Image (tube, helix red, strand yellow):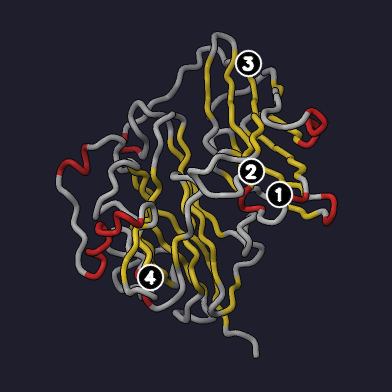
Amino acid sequence: MNYLWLGCLVFAVATPFAMPEDSQNDVQITCGESSVHVQWKVDKSMTGNPARLFLGNCFASYFSNLSNEGGVADFYYGLNDCDFRRMATLKYLVYENKLNYRPLPKPNPPSFTYPVRCVYDRPKGWTPAFHSPSAGFIQGHGELAFHMAILNYNLSGPAESNVFPLGSFVPIWASVDQQAHQPLLLLLEECVASTTFEIYPDTLTYPLITNKGCLVDGKKSFSKFLPRQHSSSIILNLQAFSFALGEEVYIHCKLMAWDPDNVNVAKKACNYNQATGEWELLDDPLRSSVCQCCDRTCQGRGKRDTESAPQGLVLKSVLGPLTFTEVSP
């Protein structure tokens, strides 16, 4: 946050919800000036799939399995991340979120919820900032922040290495945060691989996602979008390919935040089903007709797309360098 925090009161308030009294000490919350550290000791029943542990829409930064004693999930994030809700009173700025354990994807409810709250003295003269959409923000809907990272194999935290054997999977996570109630759908409109950090007219590239959300790499590999846990995040499970084998590879993507109720041929996420030879819409297979253009040209619906609310906010991001290697004999 772009505030000067001098002599501010910092404390955390965490009141348990849907949990027994004897487990209140299982969550420790440390509020920093503009960030939070949440340490969550989970029981053994939650350690099977750490990717189901969330702070808002964020995965655990680190997860340690304690064998028969359960595990510990640590979340290190800024207060502008993870869908923290910000409220301002006459005296305080309050940031609220929830820890969730979701054994099943949405719309199934979480089986465990715990509130996280950080309260700060309100800086003198503070007013909420609103930015123009041309600067990468939604006018009147609060500030948006995009994120992109490579996860480890079990989706429990950041990848520990940037080297991947040919044929292995590279989980690429992307997310958008917002300081507002209006939901957003995150889409990967386009992704290509290259051997350079910047793409020039003569740069050799390898297409991954084209045609406004069509995962074309899935036609010749097992790459696919994984089922969503939140509309505001998406995971591309990319299978390591032979393009630029042994060289440094960069993944260039165009991220878009969009209205969840206005998915169309130009705003979508489509997987290719090799078993059926058909394209399928990630967010609603019953509406897979919007993916039928993936083998042709997907065109938008004209001016209405650019004027609908929320605006289609776009960010270009680059991941890497990665290295794909031959599989050891």
The N terminus lies in which quarter of the figure? top right
Give how far apart the Cα atoms at labels 3 and 2 are. Answer: 31 Å
Residue at left offset 67%, top offset 18% = 8
Relative height, residue 166 to residue 322 (above, below) = below
For marks 3 and 2 on the same chain, the one whose residue lies earlier in the sequence: 2
In the image: residue 45, left or right of residue 300: right
Give how far apart the Cα atoms at labels 3 and 1 are. Answer: 36 Å
For marks 1 and 4 on the same chain, the one whose residue lies earlier in the sequence: 1
**Residue denoted by label 4:** 273
**Residue denoted by label 2:** 101
- CB of mark 3 within 8 Å of CB of mark 2? no
- Give the image location of residue 269, x and y in percent: 36, 57
Between marks 3 and 1 in the image, the one whose residue lies nearer the viewer: 1
* Residue at the outermost left position: 302
Between marks 3 and 2 in the image, the one whose residue lies nearer the viewer: 2
**Residue denoted by label 1:** 46
Relative height, residue 288 to residue 10 (above, below) = below
Q: Nearer the viewer, residue 18 or 78?
A: 18
